[in-house]
Image (cartoon, grey):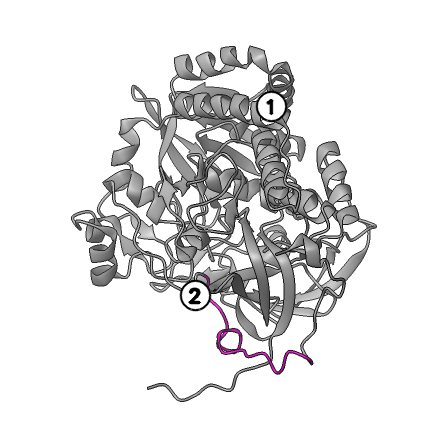
């Protein structure tokens, strides 16, 4: 037995609805729920409201749609708490108790309903050299850029898959990076078919054209991918192929990523069922667990407009006088079709399954090689023998890629779902009267 | 919390080197601009730097004000902050 730990005091917040994630889906859900009079608290890991897609340069311009929603959210009365990672959730009677690490201190949130808006992360497929400093995610590069990093004068290649590559390439070029190549693994025919299907959404075509215009001097190659990165203690060059020809380019930064993966860990901890790697929801955005709803990319990759609509629907569903407009439901259906078309267009080619060699590190936390795991029959067996996916990131970085490479099914999820300080895990409520309660107003009839 | 006035600068200390950075910058961006290669060393000693930029991958961990394993991409620089990377002196 472990010696009892001296628990620190946790802050307690009591709310009607806890929204996890302050990206577009979480913002829309929290706004609609709070507008109905419910006490809503939003927990977010980041420093600012908006999530990854609405991340903006500090002091720089905020996208107009983001301004609109962030203003609505702040008027709604919902409370947003940043720098907060959810570690565990307990379920007692009709109430959830969420344990979070809030900037190093323990935070407990009691709420009757949870809306999961946990977003997505990038899918990485490991290859030799991908652990070198200078190799980063495509969204990762965008995030760094928007948080103050300078790519000016750096030789950059953006290689991977999906519509995220265009805006990131455009902003890197805009910021003065020497963009050498944008390489999309999907075939030209598939990308063109997808682009042709966009006639229904002329705004997206115009946007894509604007992005492309910003890096016109750089080649955009389809059917092209990076097979290896080279360097000593940092990236120096990459090997590129289009299946017929293989060549090398000297670079400072390689941005890589093969699309997005829904963040389903918290949902699985709660016992929610998943479908095709996303949180399963019904037409009202309800998961298979009572009083837990889910919205946005965590329920399937669909983009910002779909996330906003799903958020609005969920926020309305939890409201005392739930009313969902038919217009919202129709828009959601149309956007879901567009999302499926996008996923088909950027389907990953078979050749990518042979990217890693036996010596390629797959688990960056525990430095486990591909050779050590590729013969395991399942994720659990591989974990037991090699510690793959058992480091601080809990497999979030390597497991989706290994699932693609080896068709593993995801292993079970156990708390804590994020590394947490012992003082947070062992925190206790000193006493409810003394603990700080964020909300004082009572909305009795709203929440029963 | 938006930090207004992009021109505002503050002082931080990275591996005993005093530098000025723009307020609102994350620690990860500040170190990237400084040319830091090894934010941390992996269990087998490899140099590692930021990958996901959003707190998922844990590759950008550094020691901030004596607290180890802080994700540099999730923390904004603060005046007087001391950051220790895995860069060898």
Residue labelled with disc 2: A416
Q: Is the residue marked by circle 1 packed among few (<14), some (14-19), or many (20+) residues within 10 Å?
A: many
Host chain of mark 1: A
Q: Main secondary structure of the magenta part?
A: loop
Image quadrant of residue A206?
Answer: top right
Q: Is the residue marked by circle 2 packed among few (<14), some (14-19), or many (20+) residues within 10 Å?
A: some
Q: Left or right: A184 with respect to A117? A: left
Q: Residue A101 lies in magenta, yes or no?
A: no
Which residue occupies the extreme bottom position in the image?
A: A3
Placement of the C terminus of chain A among the 4 image quadrants = bottom right
Task: Say which mark, if any, is on residue A79.
Answer: none
* Pick the front one: B3 or A299: A299
Residue A4 at what x, y percent from top left? 43, 88
* Residue in view at x 53 percent, y 41 percent: A295
Cα distance between the residues tagged 1 and 2 = 43 Å
**Disc 1 secondary structure class:** loop
* Residue in view at x 29 percent, y 43 percent: A403
Q: Residue A427 lies in magenta, yes or no?
A: yes
**Disc 2 secondary structure class:** loop
Q: Earlier in the sequence, mark 1 or mark 2?
A: 1
Residue labelled with disc 1: A215
Host chain of mark 2: A
Placement of the N terminus of chain A among the 4 image quadrants = bottom left
Q: Is residue A137 visible?
A: no
Q: Which residues are magenta?
A: A418-433
């Amino acid at each position: 037995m472990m010696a009892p730990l001296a628990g620190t005091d946790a802050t307690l917040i009591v709310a009607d609805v806890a929204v996890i994630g302050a990206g577009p889906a979480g913002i829309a859900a929290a706004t609609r729920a709070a507008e109905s009079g419910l006490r809503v608290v939003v927990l977010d890991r980041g420093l600012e409201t908006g999530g990854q897609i609405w991340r903006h340069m500090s002091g720089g311009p905020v996208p107009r749609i983001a301004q609109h929603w962030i203003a609505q959210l702040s008027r709604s009365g919902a409370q947003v708490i940043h720098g907060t990672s959810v570690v565990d959730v307990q379920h007692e009677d009709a109430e959830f108790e969420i344990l979070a690490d809030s900037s190093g201190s323990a935070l407990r949130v009691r709420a009757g309903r949870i809306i999961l808006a946990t977003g997505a992360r990038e899918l990485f497929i490991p290859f030799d050299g991908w652990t070198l400093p200078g190799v980063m995610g495509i969204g990762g590069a965008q995030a760094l850029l928007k948080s103050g990093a300078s790519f000016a004068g750096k030789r950059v290649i953006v290689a991977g898959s999906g519509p995220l590559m265009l805006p990131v390439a455009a902003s890197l070029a805009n910021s003065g990076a020497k963009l050498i190549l944008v390489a999309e693994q999907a075939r030209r025919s598939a990308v063109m078919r997808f682009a042709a299907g966009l006639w229904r959404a002329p705004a997206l075509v115009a946007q894509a054209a604007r992005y492309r215009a910003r890096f016109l001097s750089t080649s955009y190659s389809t059917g092209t991918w990076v097979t290896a990165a080279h360097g000593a203690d940092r990236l120096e060059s990459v090997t590129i192929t289009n299946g017929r020809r293989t060549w090398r380019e000297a670079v400072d930064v390689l941005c890589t990523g093969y699309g997005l993966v829904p963040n389903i860990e918290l949902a699985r901890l709660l016992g929610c069922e998943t479908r095709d790697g996303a949180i399963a929801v019904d037409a009202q955005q309800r998961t298979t667990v009572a009083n837990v709803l889910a919205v946005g990319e965590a329920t399937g990759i669909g983009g910002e407009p779909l996330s906003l609509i799903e958020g609005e629907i969920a926020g309305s569903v939890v409201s005392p006088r739930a009313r969902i407009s038919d217009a919202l439901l129709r828009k959601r259906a149309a956007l879901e079709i567009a999302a499926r078309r996008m996923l088909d267009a950027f389907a990953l080619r078979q050749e990518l399954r042979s990217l890693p060699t036996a010596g390629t590190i797959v688990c960056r936390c525990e430095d486990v090689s591909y050779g050590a795991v590729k013969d395991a029959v399942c994720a659990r067996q591989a974990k037991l023998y090699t510690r793959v996916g058992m480091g601080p990131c809990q497999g979030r970085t390597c497991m989706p890629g290994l699932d693609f490479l080896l068709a593993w099914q995801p292993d079970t999820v156990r708390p804590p779902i994020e590394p947490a300080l012992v003082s947070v895990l062992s925190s206790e409520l000193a006493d409810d009267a003394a603990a700080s309660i964020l909300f004082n107003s009572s909305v009795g009839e709203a929440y029963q | 919390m938006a930090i207004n006035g992009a021109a505002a600068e503050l002082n931080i200390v990275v591996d005993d080197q005093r530098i000025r950075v723009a307020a609102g910058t994350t620690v990860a961006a500040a170190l990237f601009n400084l040319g830091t290669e090894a934010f941390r060393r992996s269990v087998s000693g490899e140099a590692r730097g930021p990958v996901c930029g959003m707190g998922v991958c844990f590759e950008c961990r550094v020691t901030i004000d004596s607290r180890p394993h802080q994700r540099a991409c999730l923390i904004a620089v603060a005046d007087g902050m001391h950051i220790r990377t895995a860069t060898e002196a």
